[in-house]
Image (cartoon, grey):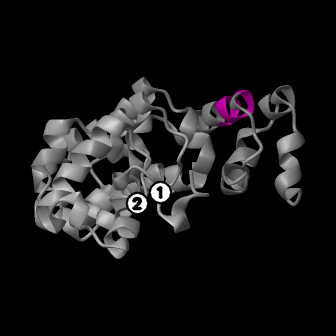
């Protein structure tokens, strides 16, 4: 589609008339547009389901191609995805518009499909979970391997989790750096939201 961003001006009714062949060829172009509303995104998601078949057969390519369109996947649909691969989860969490129930479905989907508990996760897997890690409960956060957590504190600190979860991350961070009153300016900036405020570099990300 040579129209680029102008594709956002198609009405929902016009997008509904798009052929499946056209969608298949242009999914990656449509997936990066930021101006589609929820109605437009929903129609495009339904096109994807018709083109690519059952969600259980989708892989990281499909999620990457969908881009922002994927954020209209319901909790039930997210549960249908087979999220045993952290690359597929990472493709999902590149988007930042997930609701808490959606994020929880992504987190639990990966843990259930991979057969891993959160204490088994390596740093690259924790990083791949993106802000869906905010949907973990306090017990799960306490179970995260401290050494693996330490190597991605900066990444975790860029997620604007709810205060209860940030407090759990703060307690875990104190196991590494000691009590907060002893944290240097460097540490405070590195752990970002965990201190209750974002890092300077992350203010515009969410």
Residue contact between numbered discs 2 and 1, judged by CB atoms under 8 Å: yes
User: Residue 2: percent from the left, percent from the top?
Assistant: 87, 60
Which image quarter is the N terminus in? bottom right
Q: Is residue 49 visible?
A: yes
Magenta run includes residue 41: yes
Q: Is residue 159 above or below residue 15?
A: below
- At 75% from the left and 40% from the top, the residue drawn is 36
Magenta run includes residue 67: no
Q: Is residue 91 above or below residue 81?
A: below
Residue 192's label in the rendered image is 2
Residue 198's label in the rendered image is 1
User: Residue 134: percent from the left, percent from the top?
Assistant: 34, 42
* Snapshot quadrant of residue 105: top left
- At 41% from the left and 24% from the top, the residue drawn is 76
Question: Local crowd at mark 1 within 10 Å, few (<14), some, or many (≥20)?
Answer: many
User: Residue 139: percent from the left, percent from the top?
Assistant: 13, 38
Q: Which SS class for mark 1?
A: loop
- At 19% from the left and 46% from the top, the residue drawn is 141
- State the count of labels: 2
CA gap between label 2 and label 1 equals: 4 Å
Q: Is residue 173 above or below residue 66?
A: below
The reply, left or right, for residue 73 in relation to residue 196 is: right
Question: Range of the magenta residues?
Answer: 39-44
């Amino acid at each position: 589609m040579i129209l680029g961003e102008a594709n956002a001006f198609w009405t929902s009714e016009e997008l509904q008339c798009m052929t499946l062949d056209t969608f298949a060829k242009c999914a990656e172009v449509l997936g990066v547009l930021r101006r589609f509303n929820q109605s437009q995104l929903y129609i495009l998601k339904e096109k994807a389901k018709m083109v690519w078949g059952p969600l259980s057969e989708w892989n990281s390519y499909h999620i990457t191609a969908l881009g922002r369109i994927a954020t209209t996947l319901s909790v039930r649909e997210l549960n249908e995805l087979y999220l045993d691969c952290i690359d597929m989860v990472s493709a999902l969490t590149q988007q930042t518009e997930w609701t808490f129930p959606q994020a929880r479905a992504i987190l639990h989907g990966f843990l259930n499909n991979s057969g891993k508990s959160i204490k088994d996760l390596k740093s690259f897997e924790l990083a791949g979970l993106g802000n869906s890690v905010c949907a973990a409960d306090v017990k799960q956060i306490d179970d995260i391997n401290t050494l693996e957590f330490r190597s991605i504190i900066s990444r975790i600190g860029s997620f604007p989790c709810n205060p209860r979860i940030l407090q759990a991350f703060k307690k875990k961070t104190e196991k590494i750096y000691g009590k907060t009153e002893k944290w240097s300016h460097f540490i405070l900036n590195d752990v970002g939201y965990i201190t209750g405020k974002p890092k300077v570099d992350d203010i515009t990300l969410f």
